[in-house]
Amino acid sequence: MSSTFGTLFKISTFGESHGKAVGAIVDGCPANIELSEADIQPQLTRRRPGQSDMTTPRDEADRVTILSGTENGKTLGTPIGLLVNNKDQRPGDYGEMSQVPRPSHADFTYQMKYGNRASSGGGRSSARETIGRVAAGTIAEKILAERFGTQITAWVSSVGEIDARDLTGENLTREQIDSNIIRCPDEAAAKKMIELVAATRDRKDSVGGVLTCVAKNIPIGLGEPIFDKFEAKLAQAMLSIPATKGFEIGSGFAGARMFGSTHNDPFVQKDGRLGTATNHSGGVQGGITNGEPVVFRVAFKPPATIGMAQQTATFGGEAAVLEAKGRHDPCVVPRAIPIVETMAALVLMDFVLRQAYRTV
Amino acid sequence: MSSTFGTLFKISTFGESHGKAVGAIVDGCPANIELSEADIQPQLTRRRPGQSDMTTPRDEADRVTILSGTENGKTLGTPIGLLVNNKDQRPGDYGEMSQVPRPSHADFTYQMKYGNRASSGGGRSSARETIGRVAAGTIAEKILAERFGTQITAWVSSVGEIDARDLTGENLTREQIDSNIIRCPDEAAAKKMIELVAATRDRKDSVGGVLTCVAKNIPIGLGEPIFDKFEAKLAQAMLSIPATKGFEIGSGFAGARMFGSTHNDPFVQKDGRLGTATNHSGGVQGGITNGEPVVFRVAFKPPATIGMAQQTATFGGEAAVLEAKGRHDPCVVPRAIPIVETMAALVLMDFVLRQAYRTV
Amino acid sequence: MSSTFGTLFKISTFGESHGKAVGAIVDGCPANIELSEADIQPQLTRRRPGQSDMTTPRDEADRVTILSGTENGKTLGTPIGLLVNNKDQRPGDYGEMSQVPRPSHADFTYQMKYGNRASSGGGRSSARETIGRVAAGTIAEKILAERFGTQITAWVSSVGEIDARDLTGENLTREQIDSNIIRCPDEAAAKKMIELVAATRDRKDSVGGVLTCVAKNIPIGLGEPIFDKFEAKLAQAMLSIPATKGFEIGSGFAGARMFGSTHNDPFVQKDGRLGTATNHSGGVQGGITNGEPVVFRVAFKPPATIGMAQQTATFGGEAAVLEAKGRHDPCVVPRAIPIVETMAALVLMDFVLRQAYRTV
Amino acid sequence: MSSTFGTLFKISTFGESHGKAVGAIVDGCPANIELSEADIQPQLTRRRPGQSDMTTPRDEADRVTILSGTENGKTLGTPIGLLVNNKDQRPGDYGEMSQVPRPSHADFTYQMKYGNRASSGGGRSSARETIGRVAAGTIAEKILAERFGTQITAWVSSVGEIDARDLTGENLTREQIDSNIIRCPDEAAAKKMIELVAATRDRKDSVGGVLTCVAKNIPIGLGEPIFDKFEAKLAQAMLSIPATKGFEIGSGFAGARMFGSTHNDPFVQKDGRLGTATNHSGGVQGGITNGEPVVFRVAFKPPATIGMAQQTATFGGEAAVLEAKGRHDPCVVPRAIPIVETMAALVLMDFVLRQAYRTV
């Protein structure tokens, strides 16, 4: 398993869904940053289950404790230990699934790879694993905001076949996005999405969706070609989130249908520096940020665990019908928003540190 | 710059487009693999310019030399040095662009990041940089084919608005794909694509496209959750290729529009092992390969360098019109095929080695 | 800060001396290893303070909790979280030292590097930091013992000017070594060492010493030339332990005084394999283990924190006399034994996993 | 094999002793450094064989070519490819050794690890492998000298039982050190050493020795505790050099015999900053440089390949007498000087870049 991410701003996460605790260590955080649990909690709270009847009612306060790395409210430059205890463990709910691997879940592949797996709750493949990342990423968010005014904002741009209208995200705040439970700032679309998710939940099914994320006020020059291009590490970060199936930056797949004469972003003078008139590039050129907003989208498949009966097979290969017990998110995209935002912050922060040495 | 990729099967590339040479070192290749230049050359030849009037007529033989790491035709387990000399250097062609950064190219960002850049040909941001990767990746391809029968096959599935029909790639060979110059196995679509590229070239414009890639005969258990999930490292690898804007695996963005009851891949007994009846997962579940074919798509934007006049600005911010000299690919997707295939092989090979230790 | 060690068997440690907790995450441990706190505790107990009047009387039970990575007493292949809470925090004892950096301690360099430091107890520069390593290293020790019968045994070979007689360590057990409080198996020397440490402590001074360590039953072929030669990573591991000043393997510095004709280890047939008649090489040739015992020595300086008055200067450069409060080990070598042994185990285990892929 | 070193200033070396070429890629070198082959050649020339009858008469000009990474005499920030062709290949000389592994050489361990090995000259285990490091390290030396005035100077402090008198190295220049062929600045000792090496060579034996190295004008704050302490990575670097058996920093093994009251380095105001009155620490405290000179010593064993008859065994375990053909250094320490210096420079440069981000 490879639970470490980052070259200089490095996080290592741990914890099974139904074990004692989940958490992370952040190594490489600069010293003298003001930091307390209060800086970390909000994104954990946005991520936690039970926020609405859209989401799994598992009741976890998800309170974070800083175990190390700070003193008198400031970072020491040493590893920051972050711990969230697990409260709500319901191993019984999953007992039935031990012989029948959930279709499109990680039960089968973990068992084949490790010859063992957590008996309940998905272990490390559970979305609960993301708590460590979110906690760590809030520290990156805080530093980026303080040093560069960086703002990272994600929202739900589609659920199933329902698309929100195109938004630049220019003036969107997290408060606006959180004003409805599906976290889509197009109110008309949001209403339909909420109805779709409710209907999907009622028939014990699940549905996918897409997030759009915009990061503004990004220093020019971030990203390390060749293999650690900005968009390459961002793609890795996003595809490391459970249930993701696609990533695109700027024009993305639509850009593949365009001509260069239309797609190219002409340079113009703006705000006292060279900028671009359009942003099909999504804020990166040649793997390096150009100062324009970084814009990207992430596709989430419908959650694999559904209550509806599914015809499948046991580990032994015998036909079986599975009706998953327990309560599961019918749609993960609203809760995925803080995960996408904080993973983007981790990518940005690591590149900020990797770029710093140019000044030597 | 970060020109190294891989944890155990590690490649490091070097070389500017118009410098003395390009190449790579492969460190971590197992010993006792039969290897000569003849194993490496075919994919380099598929990648090289001047293959048709679709592609830039720059004339480079692109002959590879193995500098180290083999003796008597077998690998020693030591670093394999791979060298391709540059023959065709035309610095003059690019002189005009030194004051005017090409829109959507890396001229501006390299200059801002490094305070310097190769005066001609794009330096490391040129597609010529990929020669080192392709040369290194052919070694991975060879080992995977010999040990597991792995076959990796990519083809052009769209150019501009022209889509090939859906293909599983089940029985497609590289020979079939190379049977037309656009490398699209749907002959009707291929004809239209070729016409589109010709027309685009004639008006000095460029056009984007999408590649689909299928890798068959993949061992179960490859991929290292959490952050090095199989699809996460594959996404990084693909987004590290010049001109890419998007990546999707299995159902991808289309999967985000589906319900779980339809999207889930039911388990069935097949070929004496547990497989899945459908493959919306694209061969991975929970970040680990499940033995089904790995299927993914990569979006390429239209090349940034076009001969058509573009209204833009100089580095100093003054309005300028740029008409790029030199000859450039109007569409990169046919030549991108060996790049995508060999990068996929590098990801696979590294995970094979990382998985090997489970057997200790 | 770089608190991660290992390529495949990777540990990340955290925690300040007088913070809430110290601990480690172990990522890359194979699945299906039987593991409980009882396997880890013995080396922590050997390391902990207050074992005799040789050592600091700080009272810490140092009880470890496994937070994650196991279920039903077996490893899952996922990160193993290890936590030891700090009980005995005496920040007051160190208050005086805040203006006067301790000579030869890390107070000055941490303050200069980070612009901040733990106000008490040395923070991460404290020997308490080693708890995470020792806990993690016991897991490596257990796997190595089970798979290969590997035994790693360190003892005190000198304290100040008192040298134990030469020992091969061939049949030494940890029980024998622990039979006296200085942990030197030469009883006559041990008695003198104990007297020396007592006298040193009584005059509020400290004294250095040397450990010798032997690791037997080592697989042939461990170590990754060029830069990760076996002895190179072992040297890094040892010099990463607080208070170390030197490392030598096999003949070491004495070997630099010899002729090749005497120093070379002739090959002989033994135990059905090719071995060597002598072991000046210390078990490694060309950076790779040869199957003979790995033998090395580590030099520890006298602890920097002493109660005796020292003429020095404040951070501001003014002359000052420092008499360190608190109770400190007059000699660290007995407690360093489990640290050296477990760090050696971490190096060995990582190389075992890195070597495994040769079998692909 | 692991032929890459460094986190941000990263080198990857390649090449067998008797293959086509040896060399290195340097990735992470800052842009806009003036650099040409003339900056690199001097240390390669100091390292090369055939400089005196002290050293192997193998005739290699060892001329380096920069393949990439510079333009108009300045670095681009891209990977710097460095190539040295092999001229003098004498595979025949080694034929006899193919059945009889050289005692204390890497023949046996390479064969066991890789199941293959270079048929002649030791392949990667040859000292010729160090050419890539030396070439790369000269670039680090140049940057350090220009930015910080850093001077790194090593000399021979013992050969066999002959010790030079203690020297601080304060005002020693490379020119002074090179003024005699053994490179020992104590002329009286040098004379005896030269006689000893000559006598040793005449009886076809070899002899070991020790290098002392001093690095002055070092920025405060370099080194990344915990595992990448300055002295830990320096120890790794030194023990990665062929034929090394020991490393000590500052007081080293002698410090283990001292009391804290004598060993501690009191702080004093000097040159407008806080320095230390003595330097038993060798320039590091808590794994971080303190601004005092970094002082360390490296032990080299006598070369394993000797012409004198040795009683040993074949790979198959049968008794054999080996008289090595070819011409080999009877003592490597004079030629090891540029290797030690440039490896130290690589460690320093990497830590400079890793420290730079503190300023973000």
Image (spheres, coloured by chain):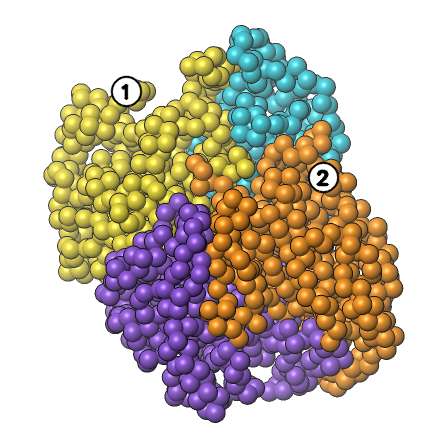
Chain colours: A yellow, B cyan, C purple, D orange
Identify the residue shown where x is 28% and y is 49%. A71
Q: Chain of mark 1?
A: A
Residue designated by label 1: A171
- Does residue D156 appear in the picture of this structure? yes
Q: Please, what is the three-letter code of the amino acid marked with disc 1?
A: Asn
Image quadrant containing the C terminus of chain A: top right
Image quadrant containing the N terminus of chain A: bottom left
Gap between marks 2 and 1, in whole Å? 49 Å
> Are the residues under badges 2 and 1 in a single subunit?
no
Identify the residue shown where x is 69% and y is 24%. B57
Q: Chain of mark 2?
A: D
Which picture quadrant has residue A33? top left
Residue designated by label 2: D67
Please determine whether, in this image, residue C198 is positioned above or below residue B152.
below
The x and y percentages for residue C182 are: 41, 82
Please determine whether, in this image, residue D316 is positioned above or below residue B246.
below
Which picture quadrant has residue B202? top right
Identify the residue shown where x is 49% and y is 17%. A274
Q: Please, what is the three-letter code of the amino acid marked with disc 2?
A: Leu
The x and y percentages for residue B121 are: 65, 25
Which picture quadrant has residue D360? top left
Please give left or right for residue B49 compared with residue C300 in the image.
Answer: right
- Toward the viewer: C320 or A46? C320
